[in-house]
Image (cartoon, helix red, strand yellow):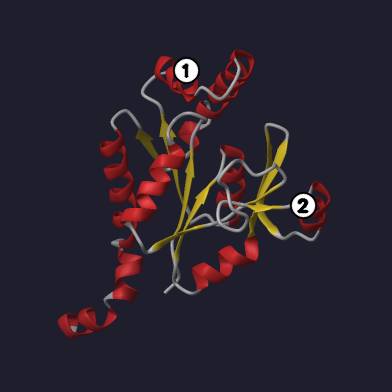
Amino acid sequence: MRGNLFIISAPSGAGKSSLVKALLNQDASIRLSVSFTTRAPRPGEIDGVHYHFISRENFQERLGQSEFLESAEVYGNFYGTSQRWIEDEMAAGRDILLEIDWQGAAQVRKLIPQAKSIFILPPSLVELQCRLDGRGTDSAEIIAKRMAVAREDISHALEFDYLVVNDQFDDALADLLAITRAQRLLIEHQTKQQAQLLSELLN
């Protein structure tokens, strides 16, 4: 049985990374795709766990060889998803989660139309600004740029299959879990998963 592909996108500061981490902790059947990136590792990040950190030259070489299912430039750095890894994992029946921006999501939907895409919204722009300010890691100029990019990101929210508002964290997490669970209960999946039971009950 072929696995599901879930895509999660959000503007910076919407809480996507925290929600994805919590989702993976509660749903062990989902595996996170580890993207390739040209940006430098942040403190605590491990190569091969958080990202595959590679040079721009290596990235361009892989891009030229069509190794990426999707790729995008974000804040001057390049990101890409391994097409072979995604295909192998889905073919093995494993559910995969892509944590990518709206540009990458659009590319993936064209190549894998059955993928389910989820966009995480902040409760308001004011709250988003507060969250970015609260990090205490960026200058006012950088935060202003992130807010401008966030508005652009949010303008693409209606292109996704699902919208989740991250106002209360636990509620947003419950919404994500409901989406992944419902996807597995679709008739196209259940007819394969429950083939023996259906054969006994319907024949």
In this rendered view, identify the residue nearer to me: 20 or 104: 20
In this rendered view, identify the residue nearer to me: 142 or 190: 142
Q: In the rendering, which numbered label is found on residue 129?
A: 1
Crowdedness near tag 1: few (<14), some (14–19) or many (≥20) residues, C-alpha within 10 Å: some
Image quarter (top left, top right, bottom left or bottom right) of the N terminus: bottom left
Q: Residue at x 36, y 47 (%)?
A: 22
Q: Amino acid at mark 2?
A: Phe
Q: Residue at x 58, y 22 (%)?
A: 138
Q: Relative to 4, is 66 on the left or the right?
A: right
Contact? badges 2 and 1 (CB < 8 Å): no
Q: Relative to 26, is 86 on the left or the right?
A: right
Q: Residue at x 60, y 66 (%)?
A: 85
Q: Relative to 43, is 9 on the left or the right?
A: left
Q: Amino acid at mark 1?
A: Gln
In this rendered view, identify the residue nearer to me: 8 or 13: 13
Residue 151 horizontal/vertical position (percent) = 54, 21
- The correct choice, above or below, for 138 with respect to 26 in the image is above
Mark earlier in primary sequence (2, 1): 2
Residue 3 horizontal/vertical position (percent) = 44, 66
Task: Tell me the SS state at disc 1.
Answer: helix
Crowdedness near tag 2: few (<14), some (14–19) or many (≥20) residues, C-alpha within 10 Å: many
- The correct choice, above or below, for 16 with respect to 23 in the image is above
- The correct choice, above or below, for 100 with respect to 190 in the image is above
Q: Relative to 24, is 196 on the left or the right?
A: left
Judging by the rendered image, the residue that carries numbered circle 2 is 59
Residue 91 horizontal/vertical position (percent) = 51, 72
- The correct choice, above or below, for 61 with respect to 39 in the image is below
Farthest front residue in view: 43
Image quarter (top left, top right, bottom left or bottom right) of the C terminus: bottom left
